[in-house]
Image (cartoon, helix red, strand yellow):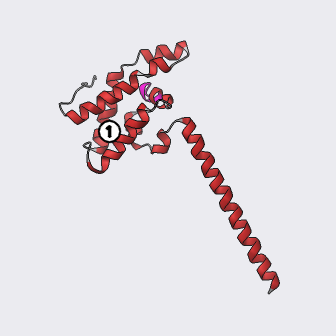
Amino acid sequence: MKISTTTGDSNRDKVREILHKSLSKVANEMVGVEMKERVVSCDSWSVAASVESAMFERLGCFEGTQKAKYRSILFNMGDSSNPDLRRKVLLGEISGERLVTMKKEEMASNKIQMEVQKIKEKARDKEENRVKSMMMFQSDSMIMT
């Protein structure tokens, strides 16, 4: 079943156009011939329409509290440092339904995800050291009394 590229709603149609523009970048981002062939065979308009439909079904109109989620998805899909997300969505490895439920951290580029992971690890190490120091201080205090 082919999904129409337009809905008649200017906001929804604009979201579809932005998604299509992002998905259209994928073919030029591919290096391998086999992957490029897979990507070229995909209909970016159909995928964009399908993703937007999932967004609309799950989030409703592009306004109010849902506007931030729409913007987050559109930003991450268009981010030049995030070709993997676009490729996965275009090839169907990430469905529109899944994309809508992903946290912004999950949509981020691999580079950003690694940076966030390093920050979390540093924070965890710092907290572990703080707890160890407190435990040593408490055990020293108990010995003195």
Query: What percent of the width, then of the height, locates residue 133?
Result: 73, 68
Q: Point out the residue furthest to the front here.
A: 80
In the shown orientation, is residue 9 left or right of residue 84?
left
Kindly identify the residue that appears in the image at 26 percent across and 42 percent down. Answer: 62
Query: What percent of the width, then of the height, locates residue 109?
Result: 52, 36
Magenta region: 88-93
Q: Quadrant of residue 111?
A: top right
Query: What percent of the width, then of the height, locates residue 81?
Result: 50, 31
Q: Point out the residue furthest to the bottom here.
A: 145
Q: Residues within 10 Å of mark 1 (few under 14, many from 20)?
A: many
- Which residue is at the front of the view, 111 or 6? 111
- Above or below residue 140? Residue 45 is above
- Above or below residue 95? Residue 125 is below
Identity of the amino acid at label 1?
Met
Which residue matches tag 1? 55
- Above or below residue 133? Residue 33 is above
Query: Is residue 60 a member of the stretch shown in magenta?
Result: no
Image quadrant in which the N terminus is located: top left
Kindly identify the residue that appears in the image at 45 percent across and 32 percent down. Answer: 79
Query: What percent of the width, then of the height, locates residue 6?
Result: 22, 27
Q: Can residue 118 be seen at all in this image of the molecule?
A: yes
In the shown orientation, is residue 69 left or right of residue 10?
right
Kindly identify the residue that appears in the image at 44 percent across and 42 percent down. Answer: 102
Kindly identify the residue that appears in the image at 56 percent across and 15 percent down. Answer: 32
Q: Point out the residue furthest to the left here.
A: 8
- Which residue is at the front of the view, 139 or 78? 78
Query: Is residue 89 a member of the stretch shown in magenta?
Result: yes
Q: Secondary structure at mark 1?
A: helix
Q: Can residue 49 be seen at all in this image of the molecule?
A: no
